Image (cartoon, helix red, strand yellow):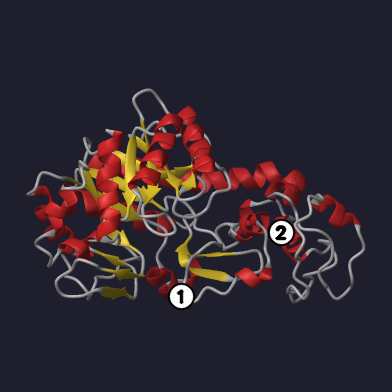
């Protein structure tokens, strides 16, 4: 099965959209039922070409009695039942409709409930990230799944951000690249120290993370006011963080030493315990949601956006041990195809008999609108174990890109 991803506003108000999508050669559409804020091109819509979506919203009717503390927002830029309208239009042309469900990525709820958001080791909040260590967040995600299945009646359920979000986030006017933080730093800045998370780690974890980010000795800083980076590191040395811990550090907390090569280098002997905490957050949320889904709509297939990396944070949640309760495991394939293929192969190794593996294929820039390039990628991903392709994004893609998708799927069939 191949799946094209779209937003409700791509369909509602555009009578030609369902046939256009059916013409791609896909069997199903991933239709956003709960989605974060965005600014989207709408190259085909009769009424507009750019749509501003200022806050995350729920695209089905909101029944107040179905929610607890956290209640999603309704959209104002499209009808409140846009998912249902789009679903019916897509099914009328023979397409399956899967509910694309974004879980813990929600700046509307995070801004309104700062006590529930992810906070890094410095105490900085990430308002776009509600933390699944909090029971209120877990309950919200459960209610979200229940409502989508009960009211939306989709042909499939797709779970995205089914775990904690982290440092990486493409927000409005993002200004973080100049700090020259390494991938290990990003992993460290993704560790949550909110009130529900902090006490789950070993006692020295916060100081260890802060010291690794600021290249200081963990006992020399943060006794009172946390020090900030005063000299950003620019050399990505392979020197272990342990070497930085044994070197002298200025009393004022000025950054010294080399960056950690990996998050394991930074955490040292704390690695296993911290990793288990992080994995546990995603495991608990995922298992609760699968249980809710099976109880609410027993026959509905469940797809997980997943990453075999145990430190993953974001849309593709960590799944280092697999998940037999899901029907499809989908890996992100937006980067180097060889690296993406390795990730797919790892998910394939974690899968159970009969479980399908999907490749989340980028068809937008910087990928070229070239069917030959796309079909070559599809073949690479299929060789790595992908049995279906999830194509992002059929509503944002130009006519040339839709033509490339159509031709690539035809050639690969």
Write down the quadrant of residue 325 in the picture: top left
Tell me if mark 1 has few (under 14), some (14-19) or many (20+) residues whose alpha carbon lies within 10 angstroms of its own. few
- For residue 84, above or below residue 264: below
Determine whether the residue tagged by mark 1 lies in a helix, strand or loop: loop
Q: Name the residue nearer the viewer: 116 or 328.
A: 328
| Residue 373 x/y as whole percent | 40, 45
Q: Which residue occupies 81% across, 69% down?
A: 255
Report the mark closest to the observer, 2 or 1: 1
| Residue 196 x/y as whole percent | 55, 59
Q: Can residue 143 be seen in this view?
A: no
Q: Name the residue nearer the viewer: 107 or 307.
A: 307
- For residue 258, above or below residue 385: below
- For residue 147, above or below residue 95: below
- The residue under label 1 is 172
Q: Quadrant of the C terminus?
A: top left
Q: Which mark is residue 146?
A: none
- The residue under label 2 is 209
Determine whether the residue tagged by mark 2 lies in a helix, strand or loop: helix
Label tally: 2
| Residue 294 x/y as whole percent | 27, 38
| Residue 147 x/y as whole percent | 23, 54
Q: Which residue occupies 12% across, 67% down?
A: 13
Q: Name the residue nearer the viewer: 103 or 230.
A: 230
Label 2 and label 1: CA atoms lie apart by: 27 Å
Write down the quadrant of residue 175 in the picture: bottom right
Q: Can residue 223 be seen in this view?
A: yes
Direction right: furthest residue: 248
């Amino acid at each position: 099965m191949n799946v094209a991803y779209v937003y409700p506003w791509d369909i509602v108000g555009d009578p030609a959209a369902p046939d256009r999508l059916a013409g791609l050669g896909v069997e199903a559409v991933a239709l956003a039922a709960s989605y974060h804020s965005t600014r989207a091109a709408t190259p085909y819509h009769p009424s507009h070409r750019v749509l501003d979506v200022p806050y995350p919203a729920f695209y089905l009717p909101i029944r107040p009695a179905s929610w607890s503390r956290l209640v999603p927002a309704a959209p104002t830029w499209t009808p409140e039942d846009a998912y249902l309208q789009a679903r019916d239009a897509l099914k009328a042309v023979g397409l399956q409709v899967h509910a694309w469900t974004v879980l813990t990525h929600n700046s509307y709820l995070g801004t309104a409930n700062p006590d529930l958001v992810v906070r890094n080791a410095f105490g900085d909040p990430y308002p776009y990230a509600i933390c699944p260590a909090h029971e209120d967040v877990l309950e919200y995600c459960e209610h979200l799944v229940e409502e989508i299945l009960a009211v939306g009646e989709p042909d499939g359920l797709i779970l995205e951000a089914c775990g904690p979000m982290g440092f990486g986030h493409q927000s409005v006017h993002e200004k973080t690249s100049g700090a020259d933080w390494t991938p290990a730093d990003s992993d460290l800045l993704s560790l949550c120290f909110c009130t529900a998370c902090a006490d789950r780690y070993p006692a020295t974890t916060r100081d260890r993370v802060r010291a690794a980010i600021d290249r200081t000795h963990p006992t020399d800083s943060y006794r009172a006011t946390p020090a900030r980076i005063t000299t950003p590191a620019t050399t990505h040395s392979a020197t272990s963080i342990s070497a930085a811990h044994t070197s002298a550090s200025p009393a004022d907390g000025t950054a010294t030493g080399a960056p950690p090569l990996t998050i394991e280098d930074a955490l040292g002997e704390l690695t296993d315990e911290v990793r288990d905490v992080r994995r546990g957050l995603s495991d608990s949320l995922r298992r609760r949601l699968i249980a809710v889904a099976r109880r609410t709509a027993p026959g509905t297939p469940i797809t997980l956006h997943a990453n075999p990396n145990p430190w993953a944070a974001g849309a593709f949640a960590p799944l280092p041990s697999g998940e037999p309760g899901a029907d499809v495991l989908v890996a992100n394939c937006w980067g180097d195809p060889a690296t993406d293929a390795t990730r797919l192969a790892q998910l394939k190794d974690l899968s159970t008999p009969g479980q399908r593996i999907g490749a989340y294929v980028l068809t937008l820039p910087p990928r070229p609108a070239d069917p030959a390039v796309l079909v070559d990628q599809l073949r690479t991903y299929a060789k790595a174990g992908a049995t279906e392709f999830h194509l992002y994004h059929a509503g944002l893609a130009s006519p040339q890109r839709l033509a490339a998708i159509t031709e690539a799927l035809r050639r690969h069939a």
